[in-house]
Amino acid sequence: MKRFWIFFLLAALSACAGPGRISSAWVKPGNIAFTPTRVIVFCVVPLADSSLRVPMEQHLADDLRTMGFPAQPGSVKYASVHLAAMSRDSAYSVLRSDSVDAVVTIVLKAAGREVLPVEQRSAQYQQWQFPGYYHKVESEAAIPETVTFMHRYWESNTYNLLTRELLATLQTESFDAGSAAQSAHEYGKLVSTHLQAAGVFRR
């Protein structure tokens, strides 16, 4: 019996491993896909730990570029720019001065986070706009080492900086013991594929 339960547990872990499943998704009603001039990918992590930031941003940016969208990782251009400490208008000004008209965020959420229905979350994230969301989740992001071999909760938002609107929000969860690089690779594909399928951007 003991061997059976060990086998069952390993099988369950294996089945849940990988990029995980989409737990909720929202796209702005009536959204008309637009062609971005420049997309910046920001991975929001605690200031004390940036181990996931670079690979997550790089993989998602690479996947978006493969699909024909001009994406770049935020850590390349804005490594020394603390957007969360800026006012809303200042943050927009910094990005728009570089012709950035869309941002995609990735955040590793704390396991004990409060989960609101997707309609409430999307309304809240729209009210905060990109700078407010960035500031809020930076202080709440889970430290990567605390979720090793545990449930990982990810969230990705897409904002149009021209209209300052939230275009889409996506939440996923996985049970993954893989490396940061593997997680980045798999999650990048999951998000980029969803954005294309949902018609958020067009080439």
Image: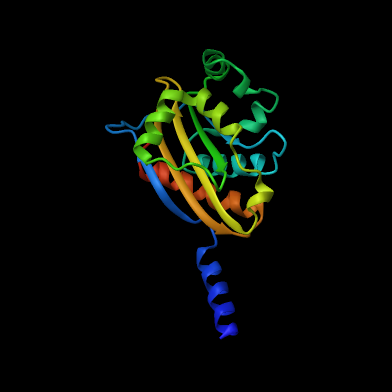
Expressed as whole percent of the image width and height from the top left, the position of residue 13 reads 55, 67
Q: Is residue 152 left or right of residue 35?
A: right
Q: Which color mode does the image show? A: rainbow
Instruction: Please indicate, yes or no, whether residue 152 appears anywhere in the rendered image.
Output: yes
Residue 203 spot, x, y in % from top left = 40, 35
Q: Nearer the viewer, residue 156 or 140?
A: 140
Q: Residue at x 47, y 45 (%)?
A: 191
Q: Among all residues in the image, which is located at the extreme bottom?
A: 1
Residue lying furthest right: 48
The quarter in which the N terminus is drawn is bottom right
Q: Residue at x 55, y 29 (%)?
A: 136
Judging depth in this view, the residue of 85 and 164 nearest the camera is 85
Count of picture labels: 0
Q: Position of residue 111 (x, y in %)?
A: 55, 48
From the viewer's side, name the closer residue of 193 and 165: 165
What residue is drawn where x is 39% and y is 34%? 122
Residue for point 58% across, 51% down: 185
